[in-house]
Image: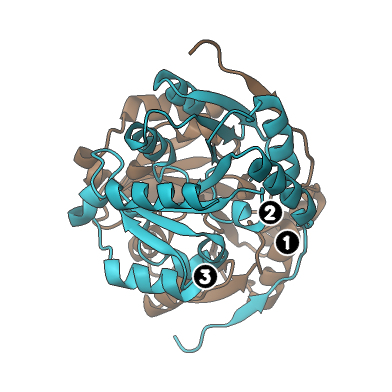
Chain colours: A cyan, B brown
Amino acid sequence: MGEIRVIDVNQGIFEKNDQVAAVNRQKLREQGTFMVNLMASPGAGKTTTLIKTIELLPDDLRIGVMEADIDATIDAEKIDAAGVRSIQVHTNGNCAMDAEMTAQALAEFETKDLDLLFMENVGNLVCPAETDTGASKNVVILSIPEGDDKPLKYPLMFQVCHCVLINKIDTREYFDFDDEAAVERIKFCNPEAEVFFVCAKTGEGFDAWISWLKEQIAAQ
Amino acid sequence: MGEIRVIDVNQGIFEKNDQVAAVNRQKLREQGTFMVNLMASPGAGKTTTLIKTIELLPDDLRIGVMEADIDATIDAEKIDAAGVRSIQVHTNGNCAMDAEMTAQALAEFETKDLDLLFMENVGNLVCPAETDTGASKNVVILSIPEGDDKPLKYPLMFQVCHCVLINKIDTREYFDFDDEAAVERIKFCNPEAEVFFVCAKTGEGFDAWISWLKEQIAAQ
């Protein structure tokens, strides 16, 4: 059909919240809490990954989870049922947690005695990438059923992430997912990104991810 | 662990664009173009569904596709390769098409001679639900791997949709997806929503969806 026509539409709706994020980051560092901002599409397996990760971390690590959702408590209930200290944050329609919301949630959750704090962001590959929350590290989950082209289509998410978990590897035979292409596309966005292939359901591949996470916590 | 604590954080960042959307809708109606706003999470199968749908629609229907992406042309290339008139719209970071962007794209695409226009929105279950584009009908795809709880977590998307396609039914045995629970949760959000179970890869279940679509076009 010939050449593809491209239209650029400009609109700037995002305010910089880097200053508040920097304050959050500083406070967390001072109190010795390592915060992971966990991002992904809806249904990529964020909650299951969190539960499996916490299960495999040392028992003496004091861990908390902030569940950010538009308007539901189903994830916090799952985390709570797994015996983890958790809080539900409602964004009231907002498509991502920003630094100010994170500051509110941190103040409310009393995170001072936590070694490790996970924030499960709203299921979305676009907006959470645009707003620094002040987390120590950003982690994104890409699941096999979503396809290996996601880094091409949502590059900012992969640029801002320190680590990518490629989840649901147990379903590989059902989907056309090219591991090498996926890693290459992630590295094109961010050459420094760590990539781990995992299955949150079974724990397959979690050793490397857990080791990396423990190293990061120790290095903060 | 006791009762779940819930924090509400308020922030209104979305402007009403209903007026522009109404103008788009009126123009499309006057020129006899039926527009479908197709929404879904990243990787739910929007492009594959579009290609299969167009393949199964009557040959004499004049069809066009607007592909909205943050910053990529991969989907428009696929649609173009399938022999369908298409245009790529770049939202430049924006998480959804709004009515103004749609108006720009409609003007640029010269849609006057089209009977049916699909807009593949940005992969996102949050933002596209909040912005009326002026489409004749909203259709959302929910794929089996994402899970049956998505209507609970992204209720607005299911409220604004006229039709829900539950896609990738060929992968049912791999995932815990309760069909009845999914339909019940969709109907709770929107009792009027039509729900079809489909597999865009094979075309399974497409008859009912195509019939519904043809009826809607005829009724406009």
Q: Work out which quarter of the rendered image holds the N terminus of chain A and state it.
A: bottom left
The answer to whether residue A176 of the structure is visible from this angle is yes
**Percent coordinates x, y for residue A42 in the rendering:** 47, 44
Q: Are marks 1 and 2 in contact (CB under 8 Å)?
A: yes
**Percent coordinates x, y for residue B2 in the rendering:** 51, 10
Q: Is residue A94 left or right of residue B88?
A: right
Q: Nearer the viewer, mark 1 or mark 2?
A: 2
Q: Quadrant of residue B70?
A: bottom right
Q: Is residue B80 above or below residue B153?
A: below
Q: For the residue labelled by badge 2, is the local secondary structure a helix, a strand or a loop?
A: loop
Residue at mark 1 shares a chain with residue at mark 3: yes
Q: Are marks 3 and 2 in contact (CB under 8 Å)?
A: no
CA distance separating discs 3 and 2: 16 Å
Disc 1 marks a residue whose amino acid type is: Lys
What is the crowding at mark 2: few (fewer than 14 residues within 10 Å), some, or many (at least 20)?
many
Which numbered marker is on residue B134?
2
Q: Is residue B122 above or below residue B74?
A: above
Mark 1 — residue?
B27
CA distance separating discs 1 and 2: 9 Å
**Percent coordinates x, y for residue A61 in the rendering:** 45, 32
Residue at the image point whose x is 27% and y is 54% from the top: B203
